[in-house]
Image (cartoon, rainbow, N blue to C red):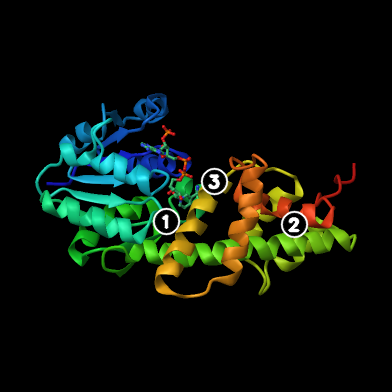
Amino acid sequence: MADTVGFIGLGIMGRGMARNLLKAGFDLRVWNRTASRMDELAAEGAHPTRDPADLAAQCDLIFICVSDTPDVEAVITGDHPRGVIHGLRPGALVVDMSTISPHATRALGARLAAKGARMLDAPVSGGSEGAARGTLSIMVGGAAEDVERARPAFAAMGKTITHVGGPGDGQMVKLVNQILVVGNALAMSEALLFAQAGGLDLRKTLDAVKPGAAGSWMLANRGPQILERDWRPGFTIDLQQKDVRLVLDAADQLGVPVLTTAMIFNLYRTLQAEGLGAEGNHALIKALEKLANLEVRAAAPPQ
Ligand code: NAP
């Protein structure tokens, strides 16, 4: 019999991912801390639940996509509201798709195993656009048989599903991904500031460099937003800051230098200090604009 599926955390990412599970025909239970966020999906056929324990009691396969390490710990092991661990069915598989600490992931896996449940870490990349379109890149850590069990659901949410290693390794690969993401964001910011200072047509500049060797997801998706000074988040500065912190923590444990990433961590800190934590991560450019006393903005299109 097919697993009954649950989804915890209907934020920017989770709501798109849960919707794609529904569209693929899964019988879906949902829970979100802010209950009103369940309404939209309930209207589309999902079944709201009272708390994570209630959801777990109804599901064999439980997906989680919440913000940070303490939040995943709360929805799995918490008492108020009651966490997944208080309602687990025997043999349930818990799949954490949030980006959190690899070390904490392994500890949570051990706690779930002690209750007869299984765990995968399966963080994602591809932004809010990828979550909505079902084209995420999913990097999975855990046992091969559990990956196969979750694969039909992963296929509804993502295009590339890579089993990268054992418990926690999905999170480690996600941190590799984040080193690349913030490096791209900084390079994009410097390049656009340089183009502005040089008096270039910024739209034509983007069109010229996007398809070549300098192209990136960041440039294609967030470059145009910068030109319009549209700071709406696909991924907030606060969450980006959290991911860079996870990289620095892990790099410290490994004893490996991450020079650019550490500098970007501090640039994001300055933006948070200015109260910009809820803006998109591409607002990194504002930190550089301040240094140059120059604003990047595309000229109004000719009438
Ligand atoms: P978001 O829009 O801020 O949503 C966060 C979700 O987590 C909300 O449903 C929130 O509930 C819930 N939550 C937070 N703390 C909680 C707690 N203590 N207990 C219960 N629920 C809690 O964030 P998002 O952009 O969807 O990101 C979610 C995860 O995906 C993060 O780990 C992020 O790093 C990762 N991610 C995001 C992106 C992206 O582009 N956005 C890409 C890849 C990975 P409420 O509705 O009650 O606030």
The circle on residue 124 is: 1
Which amino acid type is shown beneath numbered disc 1? Answer: Val
Give the x, y percent position of residue 129.
52, 48
- Please determine whether, in this image, residue 68 is positioned above or below residue 58: below
Look at 32% across and 61% down and name the residue there. Answer: 103
The residue drawn where x is 64% and y is 41% is 276
Give the structural element (helix, strand or loop) at label 1: strand
Q: Residues within 10 Å of mark 1 (few under 14, many from 20)?
A: many
- Reading the image, the residue beneath label 2 is 288
Instruction: Give the left or right position of residue 54, taking residue 179 as reference.
Output: left
Q: Depth-wise, is mark 1 or mark 3 nearer the camera? A: 3
Q: Earlier in the sequence, mark 3 or mark 2?
A: 3
State how far apart marks 3 and 2 are (Cα): 18 Å
Tally of numbered tags: 3
Q: Nearer the viewer, residue 53 or 216?
A: 53
Label 1 near ligand 1 (CB < 8 Å):
yes
Report whether 303 appears left or right of 284: right
Residue 162 occupies quadrant: bottom left
Ligand 1 within 8 Å, label 3 CB: yes
Q: Looking at the rendering, which quadrant does residue 110 occupy? A: bottom left
For residue 267, which numbered disc appears in the image?
none
Mark earlier in primary sequence (2, 1)? 1
In front of the other: 78 or 11: 78
Which residue corresponds to mark 3?
238
Is residue 232 visible in the rendered structure shown here?
yes
Image spot of residue 83 (x, y percent)? 24, 37
- Which mark sits nearer the N-terminus, 1 or 3? 1
- What is the spatial separation of the Cα atoms under label 2 and label 1, in whole angstroms? 28 Å
Secondary structure type for disc 2? helix
Quadrant location of residue 183? bottom right
Q: x, y (%) of residue 201?
A: 86, 58
Q: Residue at x 32, y 30 (%)?
A: 45
